[in-house]
Image (tube, rainbow, N blue to C red):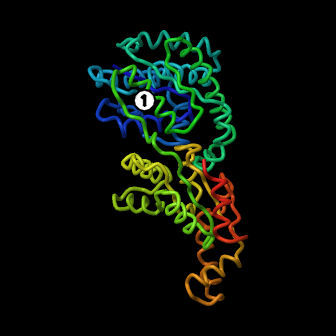
Amino acid sequence: MQIAINGVDGVGKSQQIKLLQLYNAGSFNFTGSLTKYSSIWPELKSHDMFNWWFKEVEFDEFLNIVFESLNTRHSEFEDSVVILDRGTLMFKAVCAATMSVRMGLELLDSMKEIDLRFAKGLFYGLDEEHNILLEPDVRYQSSIKPYISLLQNESNNFTEEENEFYLSYQNLLKEAMVIYFRDEAINRITVDRSICEIQDKLRLLINELADVSLPEICSGIKQVIGFGGLSECGKSSFAQHFYKKKGYYRLKLGYFVEILKRRYEKDTPESVAMEFLHFCKSHYYIENFTLESLHEPYTPAFLKLLFGSRFKIAYLDAPFDVRCKRASIEKGVSLVEAEKETRRKDLIKEGRGAKIVSEIADIKFNNSNGKHCENMLKFEKAVMP
């Protein structure tokens, strides 16, 4: 059985496939990118791949590479239960959109030609694939823009003309997918909530299709509160309060960074967030967590995409003089020394993007007025589900 996961760019299909692969209990094999199934694909990235794909390679040669790759992929997994990173229908849409944007043809004309070429170029039938289509929800996509924009790679340096050209291609691709996936038999999942919640929907659907029993991902988590803010704003004391009074399990993001470093892996926002997810899954009996310290905005942004409303970003704020007085009392140093050390720590954290955390925070809390117990009660009301 072959189950294809499809969807337009930005809908999250690659992330969903990663989660399926991480926690599939050996139920499936997984294909890689189509480029892995032919030695003819050039090893290019970004601008160079754009030029090759849309300008340099002859279109007939491009199609032949796609056919060779699809045929090889199919033959390697013909006798196994496999999850396909995009199915043949989606690659037909990709080829039709590419043909239209390169040659200036009407999309329907390109699709007719692509249908003929695929019928001749493939040695297997499309009915062998069970298609799942991830469909973006406009309102949800709009709500997660602040997090997506932080995580997007801005280093591609495409020209304005190239961006417009690629946008035209994407619009044609979406149109082609609407037509190719119009069959009522297509399994559809609307992406209108967090990565973990969509993963659970996907797992339920695959369980039905393949007659397996994939478990849900961290369904027992009720709430994760992530604390951001500059030095001496109260992150540790607030987390300790939730640990003692509410039973929240207290963690620091640095713990997961160290795990990755010990494995000689990069501590990217995604890898750190996924380490936390793995911790949650391993400790399935824990329902509530606090996370310190959100010194940069990128990992919190990914965690927000991963857990949705179950992850609350709380930014604690207090004036510099208030924080310095706290540091002086806590560390038993003079106010001048406390000011110097607090300013030094602030510069480090601000350099990492600590202030940007406040821009994506669910809760911005002024922790400078009133007694500690009074502030905690106010904060609880703001953050508790």
| Residue at point 43%, 27% (across, down) | 204
The image quadrant where one finds the N terminus is top left
User: Where residue 301 sits in the image (x, y, percent)?
Assistant: 58, 50
User: Where residue 89 sits in the image (x, y, percent)?
Assistant: 48, 18
Q: Is residue 155 visible?
A: no
Q: Secondary structure at mark 1?
A: helix
Q: Is residue 242 left or right of residue 75?
A: right
Q: Determine whether 144 is above or below 166 in the image.
A: below
In the rendered image, which quarter is residue 69 located in? top left
Q: Determine whether 370 is above or below 280 in the image.
A: below
Circle 1 crowding by C-alpha within 10 Å: few under 14, some 14–19, many from 20: many
Q: In this orientation, which residue lies closer to the viewer: 15 or 9?
A: 15
User: Residue most toward the left?
Assistant: 79
Q: Is residue 143 visible?
A: yes
User: Where residue 342 sits in the image (x, y, percent)?
Assistant: 62, 78
Three-letter amino acid code of the residue under disc 1: Arg
Residue assigned mark 1: 203
Q: Is residue 369 left or right of residue 275?
A: right
| Residue at point 42%, 18% (across, down) | 130
In the rendered image, which quarter is residue 66 located in? top left
| Residue at point 72%, 70% (across, down) | 370
Q: In this orientation, which residue lies closer to the viewer: 146 or 173?
A: 146
Q: Determine whether 243 is above or below 329 in the image.
A: above
Total marks shown come to 1
| Residue at point 37%, 14% (across, down) | 128
User: Where residue 294 sits in the image (x, y, percent)?
Assistant: 56, 60
Q: Determine whether 259 is above or below 341 in the image.
A: above
